[in-house]
Image (cartoon, helix red, strand yellow):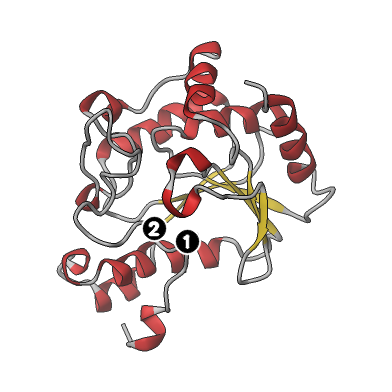
Amino acid sequence: MPRLDETRELLRDALAGRCYGRAAVVSSFGAESAVLLHLVSTIAPDAPVIFLETGKLFAETLAYRDRLTEHLGLTDVRSVRPDPGVIGRADAEGELWLRDPDRCCWHRKVEPLEEALEGFDAWINGRKRHHGAARASLPPMETAADGRTKINALAGWAAADIIAYFTAHALPRHPLEARGYRSIGCAVCTAPVAADAPVRAGRWAGLAKTECGIHAVPAAPSRREAA
């Protein structure tokens, strides 16, 4: 893990508020999330960790969130849900993901994250270049459209680095990995993939969509069309 010292230094600076202002961690508690969360727990176990509970997640992900939170001793995991009034108007039948997945992500992830990040100047995430596509040239830090600093703490970590860290620290794996899920989001938009497929091939399979919107934000559906 040649990048471990640099990653720890970056996280120490961010979590201490020395360089970027007040920072939160945003985690999906997905297939590789335990690495970043473990690093955070060794530096600041009381760091705020935002988890977007969309209402469409796998039960296994919710159980994994609880298991990792306890295992790592994280004391400020915030499970953030979408506004029930918005969902009631925009997705009363729960099938918006079929008709307009961008708008579904907007109401269930983008808007709740915007609200959850109020009062924070920066946020830390676990995206990596080895995931490919738009992430292939990911910088360690960037400025988001809202002016916040986005810290891509594991940007330079290779797949082998992730595996080695899991092994070195005996971290529990997401239970769906054993069933072929290599990148895990909402249950309705995530599929298992072959071992030699791209990491994120199971996300919105068959669609041009590759991101939920919290990183590559599309034109706001909620502003084009009232919910």
Give above or below for 180 relative to 17. Answer: above
Judged from the image, the secondary structure of the residue bearing numbered disc 2 is: loop
Give above or below for 149 relative to 8. Answer: below
Query: How much space separates mark 2 and mark 1, taking CA atoms?
Result: 8 Å
Residue type at mark 1: give it.
Answer: Ile
Q: Identify the residue at image location x=52%, y=17%.
A: 164
Q: Identify the residue at image location x=77%, y=34%.
A: 9
Disc 2 packing (10 Å; few <14; some 14–19; many ≥20): some
Assign the C terminus to one quadrant of the image. Answer: bottom left
Q: Which mark is residue 211?
A: 2
Residue type at mark 2: give it.
Answer: Glu
Assign the N terminus to one quadrant of the image. Answer: top right
Q: Identify the residue at image location x=44%, y=45%.
A: 132
As drawn, is 17 to the left or to the right of 164? right
Expressed as whole percent of the image width and height from the top left, the position of residue 171 reads 48, 19
Q: Mark 2 touching mark 1, by CB under 8 A?
A: yes
As drawn, is 2 to the left or to the right of 182? right
Q: Which residue is mark 1?
A: 214
